[in-house]
Image (cartoon, grey):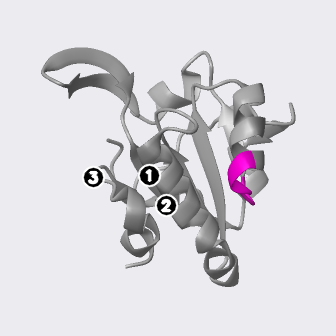
């Protein structure tokens, strides 16, 4: 994981609508940047819905929320529509952002070692500095982990 106190790596990606989203779009704002494995899977849905249900709390505290996975923009559109997600999702199909944020790597599932998305969340302050890094995400109570 990236270290707390370091500058967040620059990123540029495409959201579910095909719009370019950059780290600089969030200058002078706090950003919850979360990385998740796959749209519409149980854990990822629980995490997204927890963030959705608390979205107004985030906004009231000056945070924006942005999700990133390797799913396509079309997949993100379906996921957002199905669960009425109020925030954007970046389609990082070439893994550029995932790798820059050390959210791609080796993991064990069912006793097998594979490469994939490491569920990770970074909180980035108004100056673009990482102020929190969460690697053991509680998908059902992620907001409380972030706002603690």
Task: Count all numbered tags in the image, as a single digit.
Answer: 3
Residue located beneath label 3 in the image: 136
Quote the CA–CA distance across marks 3 and 2: 14 Å
Tag nearer the camera, 2 or 1: 1
Position in image of residue 108 (x %, y %)? 19, 25
Q: Are marks 2 and 1 in contact (CB under 8 Å)?
A: yes
State the SS at label 2.
strand
State which quarter of the image contains the N terminus.
Answer: top left
The image shows residue 34, relative to residue 52, as above or below, that is: above
Q: Is residue 85 highlighted in magenta? A: yes
The quarter holding residue 91 reads top right
From the image, tell me which residue sits under label 2. Answer: 123
Residue 15 percent coordinates (x, y): 77, 37
Q: How many angstroms separate mark 2 from mark 1 (CA)? A: 7 Å
**Does residue 4 appear in the picture of this structure?**
no
Residue at (49% x, 42% y) in the render = 35
Which residue is under mark 1? Answer: 121
The front one of 68 and 48 is: 48
Relative to 137, is 131 on the left or the right? right
> Element under label 3?
loop
Q: Which residues are magenta?
A: 82-87
Look at 62% across and 26% down and name the residue there: 71
Q: Give me the residue at 46% from left, 25% from top.
A: 99
The quarter of the picture where the C terminus appears is bottom left
The CA distance from mark 1 to mark 3 is 9 Å
> Which numbered disc flags the more N-terminal residue, 1 or 3?
1
User: Quadrant of residue 13 in the image?
Assistant: top right
In the structure shown, which secondary structural element does the residue marked by tag 1 occupy?
strand
Name the chief secondary structure element in magenta: loop
In the rendered structure, the answer to whether residue 93 lies left or right of residue 118 reads: right
């Amino acid at each position: 994981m990236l270290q707390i106190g370091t500058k967040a790596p620059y990123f540029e990606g495409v959201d579910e609508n095909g719009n370019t989203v950059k780290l600089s779009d969030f200058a002078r704002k706090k950003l919850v940047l979360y990385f998740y494995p796959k749209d519409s899977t149980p854990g990822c849905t629980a995490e997204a819905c927890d963030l959705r249900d608390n979205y107004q709390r985030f906004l009231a505290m000056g945070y924006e929320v942005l999700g990133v996975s390797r799913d396509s923009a079309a997949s993100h559109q379906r996921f957002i529509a199905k669960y009425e997600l109020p925030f954007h999702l970046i389609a990082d199909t070439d893994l550029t952002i995932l790798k820059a944020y050390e959210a791609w790597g080796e993991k064990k599932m069912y006793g097998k070692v594979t490469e994939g998305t490491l569920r990770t969340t970074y909180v980035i302050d108004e100056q673009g500095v990482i102020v929190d890094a969460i690697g053991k995400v509680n998908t059902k109570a992620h907001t409380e982990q972030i706002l603690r």
